[in-house]
Amino acid sequence: MTTYKLTYFNLTARAEQIRFLLSYLNVDFEDVRIEHEQWPAIKPTMPFGQLPVLEIDGKTFNQSTAICRYLAKKAGLAGDDEWESLLVDIAVDNIYEIRQVIMNYYHEPNEEIKSKLRDPIVNYSIPFYFDRFEKIVSENGGYFVNGKLSWPDLYFVSILDHMKWVIDVDLVDGRPHLTALKHKVLAIPQIKSWIAKRPKSP
Amino acid sequence: MTTYKLTYFNLTARAEQIRFLLSYLNVDFEDVRIEHEQWPAIKPTMPFGQLPVLEIDGKTFNQSTAICRYLAKKAGLAGDDEWESLLVDIAVDNIYEIRQVIMNYYHEPNEEIKSKLRDPIVNYSIPFYFDRFEKIVSENGGYFVNGKLSWPDLYFVSILDHMKWVIDVDLVDGRPHLTALKHKVLAIPQIKSWIAKRPKSP
């Protein structure tokens, strides 16, 4: 049996999308959550000095999006043909892009700059992306791609809490199709069960 | 016959990886290069307000990495099985990551901040990533993945000139395996022919 060991911090952030997919696949995985004090010793041992990493049968892989795509293929959530996989990959990268905008704000070390960054993100970038997501989901039968569940749907829902915590905006509020998608994903038995049992994180 | 129409600026930047793959596939493509004066009128018509986009048989797609993965599958350069595709996707995302670090420097509007950003990128980030790339390529028979050509190799070489122009560092200089990979990719007949005929850009 394949063994999976995920290493990250005690955060949802960049790892929750992997945890969602592993849970969806109904596979057991070791969910290692290191303390920030441990990080300086662990960092030099990581392939590109970053977390999360997933060990699959003892081999260590970085890059959360690539890892998710691999797991999504196993789950049948990566598109049924090349066209659908293209649409799936585009949806993921569109979500990733606005996530990065919000995370760049979070990581800005200069408080003066940071305070000026929030307004354009809240008033321009978030509506720009999330209104488009709302339209895409409304036109695709309640999902990001072709009227059926694929991994952009799981990815999208997996980051919502963290995004809300970072930028203090409920990203699906007032967007009924995205709200419905969120509830649909959270009602998937494996996801529901994962969320009920996952460790509390900030 | 499938028609391809690429729209971007007269730059290599984010589109050259797509042009490399279309050339590798030996397909005709329309290579539209808009002037910056045209951009304000075109921007609102783009799916997420950005370029490049690729029209395939009249349908418009954004997200250059997703587009490249689609084309790479057609070219047999996206991995022969799920494991190899995972390694290919990781390699691409590792390259993308350091590219973003360099592009964030380029796009920094504040000259004072920008002047402070260059040193840590040149002295820390670039060696950190490119020494790892050199090691990976040295351990994989002269390619990023499994001793054979895959699209990370094309992607890597397609961005080198632009990265050098932005940060004024030759990223393969002093790294013999990356230098050899660069020459190998540039010697692929379709790539060689594309570079000979492509329009001059800054």
Image (cartoon, coloured by chain):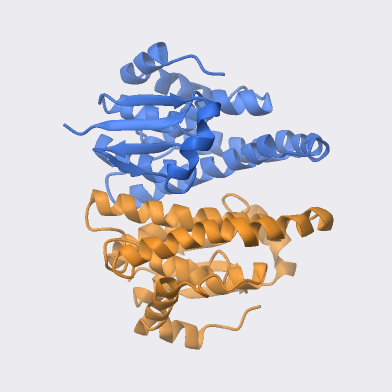
Chain colours: A orange, B blue
Q: Quadrant of residue B105?
A: top right
Asked whether, in this view, residue A164 is left or right of residue B120, the answer is: left
- The x and y percentages for residue B46 are 43, 43
Of A17 and B2, the residue lying toward us = B2
Residue B160, placed above or below residue A97:
above
Q: Name which residue lies at 46% across and 42% down.
A: B92
- The x and y percentages for residue B114 are 77, 37
Q: Name which residue lies at 25% across and 26% down.
A: B27
- The x and y percentages for residue A166 are 66, 68
Q: Quadrant of residue B172?
A: top right
Q: Name which residue lies at 66% across and 25% down.
A: B169
Residue B27, visible in the rendered structure? yes
- The x and y percentages for residue A68 are 42, 61
Q: Quadrant of residue A193?
A: bottom left
In the rendered picture of this protein, how many numbered marks are placed on residues?
Answer: 0
Asked whether, in this view, residue B82 is left or right of residue A176, the answer is: left
Q: Residue furthest left?
A: B1
**Split into 4 quadrants, where in the image is the N terminus of chain B?**
top left
Q: Name which residue lies at 62% across and 23% down.
A: B165
Of A122 and B172, the residue lying toward us = A122
Residue B121, placed above or below residue A2:
above
**Split into 4 quadrants, where in the image is the C terminus of chain B?**
top right
Of B76 and A172, the residue lying toward us = A172
Asked whether, in this view, residue B133 is left or right of residue A109, the answer is: left
Residue A59, visible in the rendered structure? no
Q: Residue furthest top?
A: B196
